[in-house]
Image: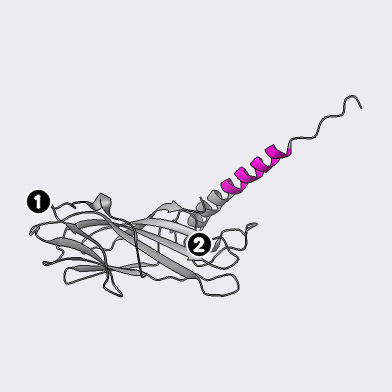
Amino acid sequence: MHGVPAPAPRRSARIGVHVNRRDALKKLAAGGAIAAGGSLVLSSNAVAETASGPPITGIPGPGEDLTDFVTFSNQGDVTFTHNDTAICPGGGGVTTTYRWRTVGFTLSPPRNKRLQLLDATSLALLNGNDISATGTCISCTDNQLTSGSNSALLQREISNIKTGDQYTLELEITWECSGSPTVVATYDVAGTYPDPATAVNTYDSRL
């Protein structure tokens, strides 16, 4: 019995597998971006199956920015729309939910009344904030993510949003399929009127 080495602790083996899987996921996401020639469009379906079920397809890859996103500026209003293309394994429909909030803005005169974030489908008010004397948001830090549709509308209560006005919103999207891991991702939606906004990933439940 002398000279026979003891077996390696199983706990260390589990930790090693977990770390390798996480590293592989990050490398997979980075590789998808490179394969797309610098674009972040193509790597959405490259996530490997996990022990908790096959992944949802047609969504951005881990940590990637939102690409199926449209900004429409018209007559002093801005509409933001996410065109969801998610598909459950086997071709089923995905349950996609949206939550929005106003993070901040800098507006040109006149600075009376408020800046409103509405659900573009129902026109329900998601956030409404007074405009300070310097054109910034009053009490934006108190805004909470509020459930809405895939489309939101940003507008002034009385006058129009003007060229050069800046804004930042937060959008949280949740994708759910039976038998697949739920994915939650958060994006900073930022822009200068009337240019298109960007939707930059700030949180991803897969990372």
* Residue closest to the eye, 161 or 103: 103
Question: Residue at position x 60%, y 43% from top?
Answer: 19
The extreme right residue here reads: 1
| Amino acid of disc 2 | Ser
Residue 85: horizontal and vertical position, in percent?
46, 71
Residue under circle 1? 133
- Indicate whether 139 appears above or below 156: above
Magenta highlight range? 10-23
Work out which quarter of the rendered image holds the N terminus and state it: top right
Q: Is residue 22 left or right of residue 125?
A: right
Q: Residues within 10 Å of mark 2 (few under 14, many from 20)?
A: some
**Residue that mark 2 sits on:** 44
Res 37 visible: no
The residue that appears at 87% across and 29% down in the rendered structure is 4
CA distance for labels 2 and 1: 44 Å
Q: Quadrant of residue 82?
A: bottom left
Closest to the observer: 177 or 107?
Answer: 177
- Write the residue at 48% across / 70% down: 95
- Does the magenta portion include 22? yes
Q: Is residue 125 magenta?
A: no
Which residue shows up at 40% across the image and 67% down it?
68
Crowding at dot 1, Cα within 10 Å, few <14 / some 14-19 / many 20+, comes out as: some
Q: Secondary structure at mark 2?
A: helix
Closer mark to the observer between disc 2 and disc 1: 1
**Percent from the top left, x then y, of residue 205?**
49, 53
* Residue 58 in sight: yes
State which quadrant residue 169 falls in. bottom left
In this view, 105 is above or below 154? above
Q: Amino acid at mark 1?
A: Ala
